[in-house]
Image (cartoon, rainbow, N blue to C red):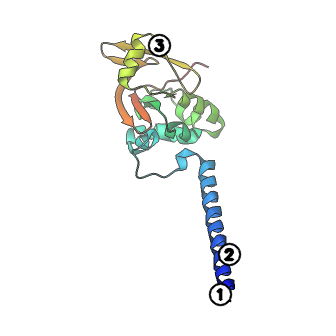
Amino acid sequence: MMKFFISLCILLSFAFISCNNSQQSATESANAHNGQASVQDTVSAANALGVAKSLPDFSTLVAAITAAGVEDAVVNAGPLTVFAPTNAAFEKLPKGTVEDLLKPENKSKLSFILTNHVAPANYPDVQLSKEADKGRKLYMASGKYLEVKKTADGIYVGGTKILKTVKVSNGWIHVIGDVLVPAE
């Protein structure tokens, strides 16, 4: 009788462990399906998207990132460099442009524009200065290249001045005053 009881306990233990692993795998699978942007992390330093979400001056950028479905591009482990246009930068676009780009039928165009703001590389302002001195262009996640120039009043990328630089957990955010719309 004792052997039967021990065998039953062992069998139930294996069944319990198997169920727990299945539930854990299902949760991991769901998170993997949703991408890195769906991971909730309140312990680590903020990534590029987390920082943008925390600042009201980037609400248009965050809305555009969400509408285009490119959240994972800016939460990627990196290193990456995001050239982040402010709300005022989006307001400089012709009237109705932002509203039009946020429509579901324009998702691919919006995605292309936004990935033109992400360099899959580590470009702190010191490195950008070196790239400008060498006359190099930056490769962007859109597949396009942006010119880097250094003048007496600062560093320009794609023709727009970098206004501020912020270190984030997965790279750098360079705040810019214009939207970098790539030529198609």
Instruction: Identify the amino acid type marked 1.
Output: Met
Residue at 35% across, 26% down: 163
Q: Are marks 2 and 1 in contact (CB under 8 Å)?
A: no
Return the x and y of residue 115 as percentages of the image width and height.
55, 30
Proximity of marks 2 and 3: CB atoms separated by less than 8 Å: no
Q: Which residue is mark 3?
A: 136
Q: What is the distance, in whole Å, between disc 1 and disc 3 at their CAs?
A: 77 Å
Q: Tell me which numbered mark, 2 or 1, is placed earlier along the sequence.
A: 1
Place residue 12 in its image quadrant: bottom right
Give the position of the N terminus as an image quadrant: bottom right
* 68 up-or-down from 160: above or below: below
Q: Nearer the viewer, mark 1 or mark 3?
A: 1
Q: Residue at x 60, y 58 (%)?
A: 27
Label 1, on which residue?
2
Residue type of the residue flagged with mark 2: Leu
Q: Are marks 1 and 3 in contact (CB under 8 Å)?
A: no
| Amino acid type, mark 3 | Arg
Q: Is disc 1 placed on a helix, strand or loop?
A: helix
Give the mark nearer the N terminus: 1 vs 3: 1
On screen, residue 17 versus residue 154, left or right, reads right
What is the distance, in whole Å, between disc 2 and disc 3 at their CAs? 65 Å
The front one of 49 and 19 is 19
Question: Which quadrant does the C terminus fall into?
Answer: top right
* Mark 2 vs mark 1, CA separation in Å: 14 Å
Residue drawn at the location 54% of the way across and 31% of the way down: 114
Displayed quadrant of residue 96: top right
Q: Earlier along the polypeptide chain: callout 2 or callout 3?
A: 2
Residues packed near mark 3 inside 10 Å, few (<14), some (14 to 19) or many (20 plus) = some
Task: Look at the numbered disc 3 and give the secondary structure of its residue.
Answer: loop
Q: Position of residue 69 (x, y in %)?
A: 59, 40
Q: Nearer the viewer, mark 2 or mark 3?
A: 2
Which numbered dot is residue 11? 2
